C-alpha cells in the first residue's frame, strides 16, 4: 500500500497482533492517502470492515500473508460500494481453494542474539540483566516466533454404497481453504521508575521530615514534630496501608540508586503474548450457469463482466485470538 502514488506513512517497527502490541503500545497504522488524515482510511477483508472505529487508526484483524489472494487500494473516484471515510479504501481478498490440494508452511524467527542492545541498557551503570564475561551489558531476552500454514483443495464425501465402487466421491466445483497463523512473543521491556531504598522502607529518611503538624494556615513544623535525618520512624507511626504496600510490593523489588540519583530503579519486566489468527475453512461452490440463462453482457457494469461463466459463493470467517 505504501508504494502507491500519493501514499505516505509513519509506520513504526512494531509487532502487529491486534490493536496493541506485546510492549503495550497501540498498533497505530499511520498511513496517509492523498494528504488525508491517517484516521480517514477504511480497511476491509473480503468486504467486511475491520477498522477499529474507536480510534480509526488501528485494525482489528491481520490476515496471514499466505492467505491473501489480492488486495486493492482505492485512492479517489470511489465506487458506490466504498464509503465510511474520505481517505484510502483498502480491501484484502483472501485466497480460495482449487481443484487440487495445495498448502504452505512458514516460520519467521527473531531472537536477542540477532539484536543490538538498546541505549538505556548500555548507558546504565547497573544494566537490568547484568554484564557478560567481556563486560558488555547483556541484551534483554527477546523471543519472537511467527509460524503457520495454509491448505486448500477439493472436497470429498463418502459414497454410502453409491457411485463407481470407490469409498469417496469428489464434489464437482466445490472447494475449501483453511489458514492459520500463530505468533509467540516473549520480551523484557526496560522500565525506569523511582522507588524507596532499604532505608526508606524501614522509615529512615535521609533528610529531616515533619511527622506531626497542625492544619493551621501559617503554622510551621518545629521541635519534637521533626524527625531528624537518619532516625528511624517508630513502628506505631507506620500507616497500615503503606506498610502493606511496602511488604507486598517494594520489598520484592531490587534496590534502586541512592538519594542523590533520585532513587532511580532501572529494571526489566517480562511481557508474554500468545496470538493466534485463523481463516476458518471456506467452502466455495462454483455453479455452472446455463447458457440460455446468462445475463447479456451489455446489461452488466464493466466491473461485473467476467470472462468466466461461473459464480463464486464463498463463506469466509476471520478469527483472531490474543492473550497477553
Image: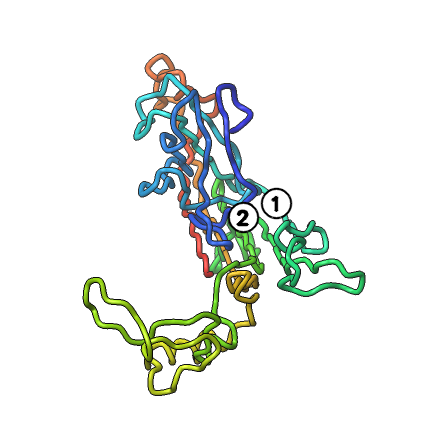
Q: Is residue 104 visible?
A: yes
Residue 55 percent across, percent down from the top left: 34, 41
Q: Which residue is mark 1?
A: 102
Q: Residue furthest top?
A: 298
Q: In the picture provided, is 81 more to the left or to the right than 70? A: left
Between the residue at mark 2 and the residue at mark 1, the CA separation in whole angstroms equals: 28 Å
Q: Earlier in the sequence, mark 2 or mark 1?
A: 2
Q: Nearer the viewer, residue 100 or 61?
A: 61
- Relative to 273, say whether 244 is above or below: below
Say if 77 sits above or below 241 in the image.
above
The answer to whether the residues at label 2 and label 1 have Cβ atoms under 8 Å apart is no
Judging depth in this view, the residue of 70 and 142 nearest the camera is: 142
Who's the residue at 56% across and 72% down the image?
Answer: 254
Which residue is farthest left?
216
Secondary structure category for the residue under label 1:
strand
Name which residue lies at 72% across and 63% down. Answer: 131
Q: Nearer the viewer, mark 2 or mark 1?
A: 2
The residue that mark 2 highlights is 15
Q: Quadrant of residue 44?
A: top left
Q: Nearer the viewer, residue 234 or 40?
A: 234
At horizontal 42% and vertical 38% (from top left) the residue drawn is: 45
Q: Judge from the rendering whether residue 189 lies leftward or rightward of residue 245; answer left or right.
A: right
Q: How many residues crowd around disc 2 within 10 Å: few (fewer than 14), some, or many (20 or more)?
A: some
Q: How are the residues colored?
A: rainbow
Q: Residue furthest right?
A: 134
Percent coordinates x, y for residue 257 in the rendering: 57, 65
Which numbered circle lies on residue 191?
Answer: none
Q: Residues within 10 Å of mark 1 (few under 14, many from 20)?
A: few
Q: Pinpoint residue 297: horizontal percent, then vertical percent.
A: 38, 15
User: Is residue 109 visible to the viewer in this orientation of the structure?
Assistant: no
Amino acid at each position: 500500500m505504501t508504494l502507491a502514488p500519493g501514499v505516505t506513512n509513519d509506520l513504526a517497527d512494531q509487532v502487529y497482533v491486534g490493536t496493541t502490541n506485546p510492549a503495550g503500545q497501540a498498533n497505530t497504522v499511520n498511513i496517509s492517502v492523498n494528504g488525508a488524515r491517517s484516521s480517514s482510511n477504511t480497511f476491509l477483508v473480503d468486504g467486511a470492515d475491520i477498522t477499529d472505529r474507536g480510534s480509526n487508526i488501528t485494525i482489528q484483524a491481520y490476515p496471514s500473508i499466505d492467505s491473501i489472494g489480492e488486495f486493492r487500494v482505492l485512492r479517489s473516484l470511489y465506487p458506490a460500494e466504498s464509503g465510511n471515510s474520505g481517505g484510502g479504501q483498502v480491501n484484502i481478498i483472501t485466497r480460495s481453494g482449487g481443484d487440487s490440494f495445495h498448502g504452505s508452511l512458514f516460520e519467521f524467527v527473531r531472537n536477542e542474539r540477532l539484536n543490538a542492545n538498546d541505549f538505556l541498557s548500555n548507558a546504565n551503570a547497573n544494566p537490568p540483566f547484568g554484564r557478560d564475561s567481556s563486560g558488555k551489558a547483556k541484551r534483554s531476552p527477546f523471543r519472537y516466533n511467527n509460524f503457520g500454514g495454509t491448505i486448500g483443495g477439493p472436497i470429498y464425501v463418502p459414497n454410502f454404497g453409491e457411485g463407481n465402487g470407490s469409498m469417496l466421491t469428489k464434489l464437482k466445483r466445490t472447494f475449501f481453504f483453511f489458514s492459520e497463523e500463530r505468533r509467540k512473543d516473549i520480551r523484557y521491556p526496560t522500565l525506569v521508575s523511582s522507588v524507596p531504598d532499604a532505608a526508606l522502607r524501614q522509615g529512615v529518611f535521609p533528610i529531616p521530615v515533619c511527622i506531626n503538624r497542625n492544619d493551621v494556615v501559617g503554622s510551621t513544623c518545629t521541635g519534637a514534630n521533626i524527625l531528624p535525618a537518619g532516625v528511624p520512624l517508630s513502628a506505631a507511626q507506620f500507616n497500615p496501608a503503606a506498610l502493606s504496600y511496602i511488604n507486598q510490593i517494594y520489598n520484592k523489588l531490587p534496590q534502586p540508586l541512592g538519594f542523590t540519583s533520585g532513587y532511580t530503579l532501572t529494571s526489566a519486566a517480562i511481557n508474554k503474548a500468545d496470538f493466534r489468527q485463523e481463516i476458518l475453512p471456506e467452502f466455495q461452490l462454483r455453479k455452472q450457469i446455463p447458457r440460455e440463462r446468462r445475463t447479456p453482457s451489455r446489461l452488466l457494469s464493466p466491473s461485473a463482466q467476467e470472462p468466466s461463466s461461473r459464480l463464486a459463493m464463498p463463506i469466509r470467517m476471520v478469527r483472531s485470538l490474543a492473550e497477553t
